[in-house]
Structures are given as structure tokens and as C-alpha cells.
């Protein structure tokens, strides 16, 4: 088994790989691969962290941020008290082990109070009546046959959505490559305890659950479970190489955090914020765009913000972020657009576009700050954006079909 270890971003690490191994890694999309010579390849992170099994290789991508900061970003805006579980892990850099152990702790703590049960409506075919007879179906599908009887009844069971999510997450984490055996055993014990619970079909949309007094003690472990299951699968084209493991896309984590934190800060000042705001680039509404945040004041766009964990440099388009923001500003009729990067991945700067006068500002958030200081920095950014809005002279706006022109 070949071990490949890299950091999520940075210059990369040389590894001795066969051409077939290099092709598999490149096809996985979780790292980038470039040849250095016939047997050595430069493997670089692409902003993802975690561990995965690809062919005969175990790929481990280490985060740049401390574990506690990543969990803060993941859980921001959710009223959960799982931070105490992270205290023993502040010095480790193995994110997946921490997540697996913390999830196991929460699941054990939750299930110790008893496995949740509830009534679930079942449709079944039985020899005797149970619940209510489905008379119409009995007549139309059985054509007068006496048995089997088509019935509908309420079953008091542990096979409910809450337990399905917990069991599925435990199954995913216990099969992560290189997981500590003691943690794997604890996760297996959780799946055994929930052995009568149906399996979820991984890759499909997660079933919804509603918070209530009955399942309140499940809320934290359900957040963990949903987060694990969302990150379990990696977006790959059909027919690509199979990737098994657990990978977190830090760009998505950063985007979700910024939408919530900066959105709340701007709304505290005034107006409303629309995340993933649907807009159109063209007058025919054929090219759709979704800026991460659009701040509306008095019903009109006042600012547009896009989260960029690190600069997007598509082949042939080294300044893709700037082009994208210019399109947003042009469509919305705004004089200034705001790109927000993670500090260290891109410098703070400003560009004024020739011929339009549109200014594109790049801000940076220091994610290594303590949470209270990071949120204070977000508040300062919101105040800066508001000040720029109040002093900027916006181009004339008019309402057009499908968006602001």
C-alpha cells in the first residue's frame, strides 16, 4: 500500500508513483498531480482535507488550520455544545480521527439515554387484519381475493429517520482508511445497537427530520451525522475512479461560514442579505449566476460578495475570480464588488476595471484567530462594506427581465 501525504494548499510534496497511480490520483480531483521526472510526481492539495483510499494508495490531506477552528467553521450558526469533545485534540492534526472520535462520543452519549422510537406508518400485505384495511387497493389489485390483506398500520419502532442517519454515519466513519482500531470498534458497536434500522442509500438526498421535544437530545449527533454524510461522497464525473474515504471541501466550509457570519453582520446594519442569490448575466435570462451574497437595501442591490477560500486559477484564466465578480457587478449595476479570501491564500488588494470604473476589492479573513476575534473581524468587514456603499456613486440601475440591469 502506497501512502501519499500532502497539505491542503501549498507548493506540494514529491512522491514516487507509477504512471497508473499518478493517473488515478489526478482523476480523483482531490489532489493535483504534476510530473517531475519518470518516477517522481509533485502532489499538491486542492483545498480539501481528509483521508481516502484510491486504488492501492491511502491519501491523507492535512489541514492548515487547527482542528478547533475547523469545527468552529463547520458548526457556526448551530446551537450545539460539542466543543468540549475537542479539548483533548487541539494539538493533533488528524482531522478525520478527531471527527470520528467526537461523533462516537456524541452517539454513545445520546444512545445511552435510550434508542429513540416513534410511530411509523406501514403499508403491508398480511394474512390477518392489522390497523386499517386498504379497501380500494384490495378490490382493484386483488380482485376480490381474501388474502393476502392490504393493510395500513402504525408501527412503534426504532427504524426512524433519526436512527437511520446515525447508523449510516457510523458505518461511513468506521470504514475510513487508517482509523484508530479502538474508535472503529466503538463505531461498530453503535451500528450493532441500531442493527434493526434500515440502511440509507448513500449518494441520495438525506431524509429530513423535524426538531421537537421528543428528539431534542439527538440534535447534536444528528448534525454530526448529516455533516459526515454530506461530505462522504466526492463529486466525480460518471465512470471516474472510485474514491473511498472522508473528504471535506474547505472552500465549501468557508463559503457556508461567510454566508452566515457576514450575512448576519450586514443585516444587523440594515436591509437583508440573500445567499446564493439567483441572477442573470444576459437580458434573455439564458446565463444564470449565483453570487454567494447580495446585500439589499431599500429593495435594491447595495453590495455583492463572493467567498473564495483560495484564488481560482482555471487553466487559461488566471484571474477567473476577477472576471466573475466583474460580471456580477455589471449585471447588478454596482460600482464595487467584494471578494473574500482566507488570509494567507490571497493578498488584500483592489483593482479598478478599465472602461467601466468598477472596483473589485479583495478582503482577507484570518481563520486562525480565536472565534471571538474572527467574528469581530467579520463585523469590521461588514462595516467597511457599508461605508463603501454609502460613499460610492453607483451606475444608473433599472429593473429588467430576470434581474437588475
Image: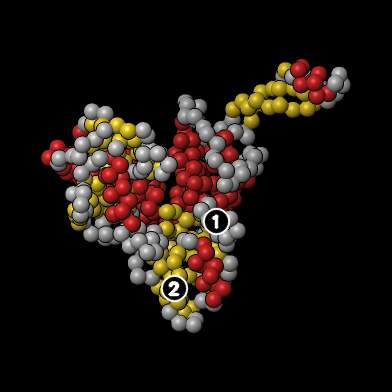
Q: Are marks 1 and 2 in contact (CB under 8 Å)?
A: no
- Measuring from the top left, give residue 267's x and y in whole percent: 25, 33
Q: Which residue is mark 1?
A: 237
> Residue 275: which disc?
none
- Measuring from the top left, give residue 161's x and y in whole percent: 57, 35
Task: Please say if 35 is above or below 238.
Answer: below
- Measuring from the top left, give residue 318's x and y in whole percent: 33, 62
Which residue is at 58% across, 46% downward?
A: 202
Q: Is residue 75 visible?
A: no
- The local secondary structure at tag 1 comes to loop
Task: Please say if 5 is above or below 150.
Answer: below
- Which of the 4 image quarters holds residue 295? top left
Q: Quadrant of the N terminus?
A: bottom right
Comparing 367 with 346, the one in front is 346
On the rendered structure, is 133 left or right of 163?
Answer: right
Q: Which residue is mark 2?
A: 34
Task: Please say if 41 is above or below 215.
Answer: below
| Farthest-out residue, right | 145
On the rendered structure, is 146 left or right of 268?
Answer: right
Q: CA distance from mark 1 to mark 2?
A: 21 Å
| Farthest-out residue, bottom | 38
Amino acid at each position: 500500500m502506497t501512502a501519499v501525504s500532502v497539505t491542503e494548499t501549498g507548493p506540494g510534496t514529491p512522491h514516487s508513483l507509477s504512471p497508473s497511480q499518478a493517473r488515478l490520483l489526478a482523476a480523483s480531483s482531490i489532489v493535483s498531480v504534476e510530473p517531475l521526472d519518470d518516477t517522481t510526481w509533485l502532489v499538491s492539495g486542492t483545498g480539501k482535507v481528509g483521508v481516502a483510499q484510491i486504488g492501492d494508495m491511502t491519501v491523507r490531506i492535512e489541514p492548515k488550520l487547527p482542528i478547533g477552528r475547523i469545527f468552529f467553521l463547520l458548526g457556526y450558526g448551530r446551537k450545539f455544545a460539542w466543543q468540549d469533545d475537542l479539548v483533548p485534540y487541539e494539538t493533533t492534526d488528524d482531522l478525520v480521527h478527531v471527527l470520528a472520535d467526537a461523533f462516537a462520543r456524541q452517539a454513545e452519549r445520546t444512545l445511552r439515554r435510550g434508542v429513540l422510537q416513534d410511530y411509523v406508518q406501514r403499508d403491508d400485505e398480511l394474512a390477518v387484519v392489522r390497523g386499517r384495511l386498504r379497501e380500494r387497493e384490495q378490490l382493484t389489485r386483488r380482485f376480490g381475493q381474501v388474502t393476502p390483506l392490504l393493510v395500513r398500520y402504525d408501527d412503534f419502532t426504532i427504524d426512524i429517520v433519526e436512527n437511520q442517519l446515525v447508523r449510516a454515519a457510523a458505518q461511513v466513519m468506521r470504514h475510513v482508511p487508517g482509523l484508530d482500531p479502538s474508535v472503529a470498534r466503538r463505531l461498530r458497536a453503535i451500528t450493532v445497537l441500531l442493527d434493526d434500522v434500515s440502511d440509507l442509500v448513500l449518494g441520495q438526498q438525506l431524509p429530513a427530520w423535524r426538531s421537537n421535544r421528543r428528539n431534542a437530545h439527538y440534535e447534536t449527533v444528528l448534525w454530526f451525522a448529516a455533516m459526515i454524510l454530506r461530505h462522504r461522497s466526492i463529486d466525480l464525473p460518471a465512470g471516474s475512479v472510485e474514491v473511498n474515504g472522508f473528504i471535506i471541501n474547505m472552500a465549501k466550509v468557508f463559503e457556508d461560514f461567510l454566508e452566515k457570519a457576514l450575512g448576519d453582520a450586514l443585516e444587523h446594519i440594515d436591509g437583508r442579505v440573500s445567499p446564493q442569490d439567483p441572477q442573470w448575466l444576459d437580458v434573455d435570462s439564458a446565463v444564470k449566476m449565483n453570487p454567494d451574497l447580495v446585500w439589499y437595501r431599500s429593495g435594491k442591490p447595495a453590495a455583492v460578495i463572493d467567498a473564495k477560500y483560495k484564488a481560482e486559477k482555471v487553466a487559461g484564466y488566471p484571474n477567473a475570480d476577477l472576471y466573475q465578480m466583474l460580471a456580477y457587478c455589471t449585471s447588478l449595476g454596482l460600482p464595487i464588488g467584494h471578494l473574500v479570501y482566507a488570509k494567507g491564500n490571497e493578498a488584500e488588494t483592489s483593482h479598478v476595471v478599465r472602461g467601466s470604473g468598477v472596483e473589485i476589492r479583495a478582503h482577507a479573513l484570518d481563520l486562525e484567530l480565536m472565534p471571538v476575534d474572527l467574528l469581530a473581524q467579520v463585523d469590521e468587514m461588514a462595516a467597511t462594506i457599508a461605508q463603501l456603499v454609502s460613499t460610492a456613486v453607483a451606475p444608473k440601475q433599472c429593473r429588467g427581465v430576470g434581474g437588475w440591469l
